[in-house]
């Protein structure tokens, strides 16, 4: 499943309790990205919630900071720090594995991408492959993230959800997100497990 939590500039950051819940419900590693000084900074590969929280506290994020958080459930390539999100926008596969990087554009994904799904690929996730093979060709400049036709095309190709941040801190979301007082969540697994499963069950 995975979950993305997007906090645009001017929006509060998620609480420690919400972060713990997202990690518990999506326990295969986490990462985050933020924009400062004309770059997107990616930090990922956190395999336990306490190390993740410790890293976030050291960043001293406030409501002024645009931040995207991601919590993973593995669907391809197994549970490994290198395949946690976010990923930098690049056509180089080796860059998908870097745990600490600075780039012009970062990507977090929620879902399964049939176009790049390969159960035999034990090294790269479907998201990593989609970034290198497709998004690196589709997103060529910051204005692409403000183009509804481009975002619709990405959604059509992937059939899932994204939060994409550029170096200015602008965050484009693709797919339907839940708005909780400004915070955007890609699904309802930010609820405690009991509520999450109860709410999910009520849909059927």
Image: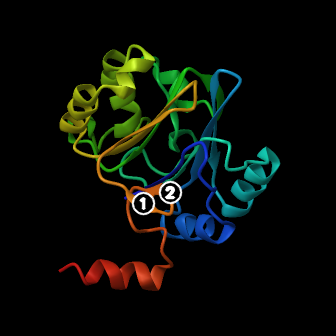
Q: Position of residue 76 (x, y in %)?
A: 37, 46
Q: Secondary structure at mark 2?
A: loop
Q: Residues within 10 Å of mark 2 (few under 14, many from 20)?
A: some
Q: Which mark is residue 179?
A: 1
Q: Secondary structure at mark 1?
A: strand
Quadrant containing the N terminus in the rendered view: bottom left
State the residue in front, 11 or 153.
Answer: 11
Q: Residue at x 39, y 56 (%)?
A: 186
Q: Which mark is residue 194?
A: none
State the residue in front, 111 or 180.
Answer: 180
Tell me, yes or no, whether the two marked residues, 1 and 2, touch with CB atoms within 8 Å: yes
Quadrant containing the C terminus in the rendered view: bottom left
**Alpha carbon of mark 1 to alpha carbon of mark 2: how far?**
6 Å
In the rendered image, the vertical position of residue 32 relative to residue 195, given as above or below? above
Residue bearing the label numbered 2: 182
Q: Residue at x 29, y 44 (%)?
A: 119
Q: Residue at x 22, y 78 (%)?
A: 203
Query: In the picture, residue 68 is in which quadrant?
Result: top right
Q: Residue at x 46, y 23 (%)?
A: 93
| Residue 116 in the figure: left or right of residue 128 | left
Q: Position of residue 46 (x, y in %)?
A: 65, 50
Q: Position of residue 50 (x, y in %)?
A: 73, 62
| Residue 75 in the figure: left or right of residue 181 | left
């Amino acid at each position: 499943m995975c979950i993305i939590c997007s906090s645009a500039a001017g929006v509060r950051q998620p609480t420690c309790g919400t972060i713990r819940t997202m990690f518990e419900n999506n326990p295969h590693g986490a990462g985050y990205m933020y924009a400062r000084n004309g770059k997107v900074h990616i930090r990922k590969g956190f395999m336990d919630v306490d190390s993740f929280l410790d890293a976030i506290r050291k960043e001293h994020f406030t409501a002024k900071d645009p931040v995207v958080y991601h919590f993973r459930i593995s669907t391809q390539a197994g549970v490994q720090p290198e395949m946690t999100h976010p990923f930098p926008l690049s056509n180089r596969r080796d860059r998908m594995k870097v745990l600490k990087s600075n780039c012009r554009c970062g990507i977090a994904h929620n879902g399964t991408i049939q176009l790049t799904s390969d159960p035999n690929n034990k090294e790269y996730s479907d998201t990593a492959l989609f970034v290198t093979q497709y998004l690196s060709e589709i997103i060529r400049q910051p204005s692409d993230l403000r183009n509804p036709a481009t975002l619709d095309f990405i959604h059509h190709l992937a059939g899932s959800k994204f939060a994409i941040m550029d170096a200015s801190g602008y965050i484009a979301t693709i797919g339907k997100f839940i708005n909780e007082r400004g915070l955007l969540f890609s699904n309802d697994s930010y609820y405690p497990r009991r509520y999450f499963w109860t709410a999910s069950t009520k849909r059927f």
